[in-house]
Every structure is written in C-alpha cells, then in structure tokens.
Image (cartoon, rainbow, N blue to C red):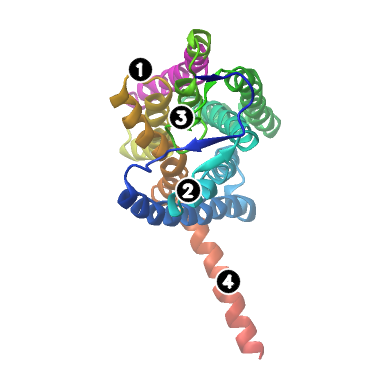
C-alpha cells in the first residue's frame, strides 16, 4: 500500500527490536552528547580567547567544532527521547527539518575537512608563503563556500526525497530521518532517487576525499625530502589529528551512504549511522586536544589565569 499524500508522522524504529540495547545506548549516547557539548565548546572558547590560537588552522577548527555542535544537537535529543520511552514517532515536518539539517551540515563538514587539508598542505609544502596564501579574507571565503555548498546540496536533495510515495506503515528502519532510510521506506520506483543519492555521494564524499588524499600525498612527498627529525615530528603533529578525523568521518559516511542494498548492510549501516551522528562529533575535540600541544598549552594557560585571578581575589579579601 502506498500513501501518495503527506503522512502525518513517521515511526523511527531505531533499535526498538532490542529493548535492552536501547537502555545501554541511552546511557552511552547521553554521556557522549554531554562530552561533545563540553569538548567542542571548549575548543571554540580557546580559539577565541587565546591569542596564540588566532591562526587559520584554529579558525577552521573552531568552525568544525561549531558544525559538530549543530550536527549532533539536530538529532541526539530526539534520539534520547526515543531510546528512553515507548514513543518512537516523529512528525512529517520534524522529519523534513531533520533531513534538511542532516544533509546541510553533513555536506558542509565534508567540504570543511577538505579546506582544512588544503590549509595543512600549504603549511607543510609552502611554509614561507603560508601567511600570504592563507590570509584572513581567504579563510572566511573558504568557510562561507563550505556552508553554501552544504546549503545547496540540502536544498537540491531534500524535496525529491520527501516527495517519494511512502508506504502506509511509515516505519523508518533508522533512528533519524536520512536519505537511505527514507528511500527504503518508499513503495514506489526509487530509481531516480537512488541515482540522485549516488551522484550526490560522489560529489560530497568521493570528490572531497580524493582532494584530501591528493593533498596528503603531496605532504608525504614533502616530508620524505626532510632530513631533520624535528621537522618530521612537527609535520606529523601538524597533520596527524586532521588525518584521524578525516578517516573516522569519511569511513562512517561512506558506510551509510554508499552501502549495498541488502538487509545485512542496512543493519550494519544503522550502527555506522549512529557513530556518524554521535561518535565523530565526540572524538573530534578529543583528538585535537589530546594530540595537539598548542591546544593543551592554551587550556593550561586558561586554567592558570583562572587560578591566578582567584588567588588575587583571595589575597585582596
């Protein structure tokens, strides 16, 4: 049975077939969400307050943290509500908004990670011209480009997905409204939508990832020509955090949007989708904080200032 009119609501199945797993996931996702809020907010504050972090690299990083905050907040509160209670429904309007935001922010992050790879390429391969090439105006232009591309992708792909002839049971085998799950819900011909998703995935996943790999290939060649062990470690420290973040984000994104069409892949894709929505925004600030000496030093300076100010107030009293 096909419903050609707009459905009243959708039923997000998530992991409802495993009630015990839902309770465990509720605790894990709750803790992860709190840590995500704290970690990404901390990076944004450090990038704003510490003058030593007023550089293009940390400008892009603070934008990535803001993006992760928006991305995870667009789905996690509703996910927690569904994991905790028996009600699993979401309105058609709510699903539409969530789909639009998911596509918008996900595409923006793909482009932003590519921009950050270009920044690292210039820093390692053109260090003497870095300040001239990556100037503040270009930084703002690159970030604006990432957001605009994300917006355009969402505007193009969201309406056709929502116009699919959805089955009357309205059961979405996922925990959020995503394009693959909504296509699977359709009882009509989905050939056009699948082709559109495949083409979009090539442009927002494969092409940016290819550009990132080209950038790191050039970085690897430049590093191999360096004879200094100190320079080796500096180049590795400059790029390793971003490379880990790229690996985590793109591996989960490709598993969700380029998965084969079979039940096993769909179940596996649900867990990858959970990691894509909850895990990567959590791990990004941890990776950049734990592996970056400048961020750790900025955090110590910020805490040191707080300690000094409290001691001075105590002496004055």
What residue is disc 3 on? Answer: 124
**Nearer the observer, disc 1 or disc 3?**
1
Residue bounds of the magenta highlight: 197-225
Q: What is the C-alpha distance between the residues marked 1 and 2? A: 26 Å
**Nearer the observer, disc 3 or disc 4?**
4
- Crowding at dot 2, Cα within 10 Å, few <14 / some 14-19 / many 20+, comes out as many
Q: Position of residue 40 (x, y in %)?
A: 53, 50
What residue is disc 4 on? Answer: 306
Is residue 83 covered in magenta?
A: no
State which tag comes first along the sequence, 1 or 4.
1
39 or 132: nearer the eye?
39
Dot 1 and dot 2 residues touching (CB under 8 Å): no
Judging from the image, what secondary structure is the residue with disc 2 in?
A: helix
48 or 71: nearer the eye?
71
The main secondary structure of the magenta stretch is helix
Judging from the image, what secondary structure is the residue with disc 3 in?
A: helix
- The residue shown at (46%, 55%) is 35
Up the image or down, 257 lies above or below 191; here it is below
Q: Position of residue 240 (x, y in %)?
A: 38, 37
What residue is disc 2 on? Answer: 82
What residue is disc 1 on? Answer: 261
Up the image or down, 4 lies above or below 315; here it is above
State which tag comes first along the sequence, 1 or 3.
3
Q: Position of residue 259 (x, y in %)?
A: 36, 21
Q: What is the C-alpha distance between the residues marked 3 and 4? A: 35 Å
């Amino acid at each position: 049975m096909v419903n050609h009119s707009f459905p009243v609501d959708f039923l997000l199945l998530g992991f409802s077939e495993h009630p015990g797993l839902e309770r465990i996931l509720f605790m894990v996702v709750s803790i992860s969400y709190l840590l995500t809020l704290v970690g990404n907010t901390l990076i944004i504050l450090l990038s704003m307050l510490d003058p030593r972090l007023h550089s293009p690299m940390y400008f892009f990083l603070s934008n990535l943290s803001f993006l992760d905050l928006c991305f995870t907040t667009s789905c996690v509160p509703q996910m927690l509500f569904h994991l905790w209670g028996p009600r699993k429904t979401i309105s058609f309007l709510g699903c539409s908004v969530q789909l639009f935001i998911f596509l918008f922010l996900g595409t923006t992050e793909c482009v932003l990670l590519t921009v950050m790879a270009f920044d690292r390429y210039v820093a390692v391969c053109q260090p003497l011209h870095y300040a001239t090439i990556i100037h503040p105006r270009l930084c703002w232009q690159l970030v604006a480009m990432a957001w605009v591309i994300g917006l355009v992708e969402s505007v193009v792909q969201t309406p056709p997905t929502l116009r699919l002839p959805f089955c009357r049971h309205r059961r979405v085998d996922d925990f959020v409204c995503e394009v693959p799950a909504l296509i699977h819900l359709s009882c009509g011909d989905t050939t056009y939508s699948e082709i559109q998703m495949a083409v979009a995935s090539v442009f927002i996943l494969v092409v940016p990832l290819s550009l990132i790999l080209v950038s790191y290939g050039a970085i690897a060649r430049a590093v191999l020509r360096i004879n200094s062990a100190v320079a080796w470690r500096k180049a590795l420290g400059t790029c390793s955090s971003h490379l880990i973040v790229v690996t985590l984000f793109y591996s989960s994104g490709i598993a969700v949007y380029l998965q084969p069409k079979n039940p096993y892949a769909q179940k596996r894709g649900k867990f990858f989708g959970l990691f894509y929505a909850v895990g990567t925004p959590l791990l990004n600030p941890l990776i950049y904080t734990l592996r970056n000496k400048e961020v750790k030093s900025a955090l110590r300076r910020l805490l040191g200032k707080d300690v000094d100010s409290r001691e001075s107030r105590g002496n004055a009293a």
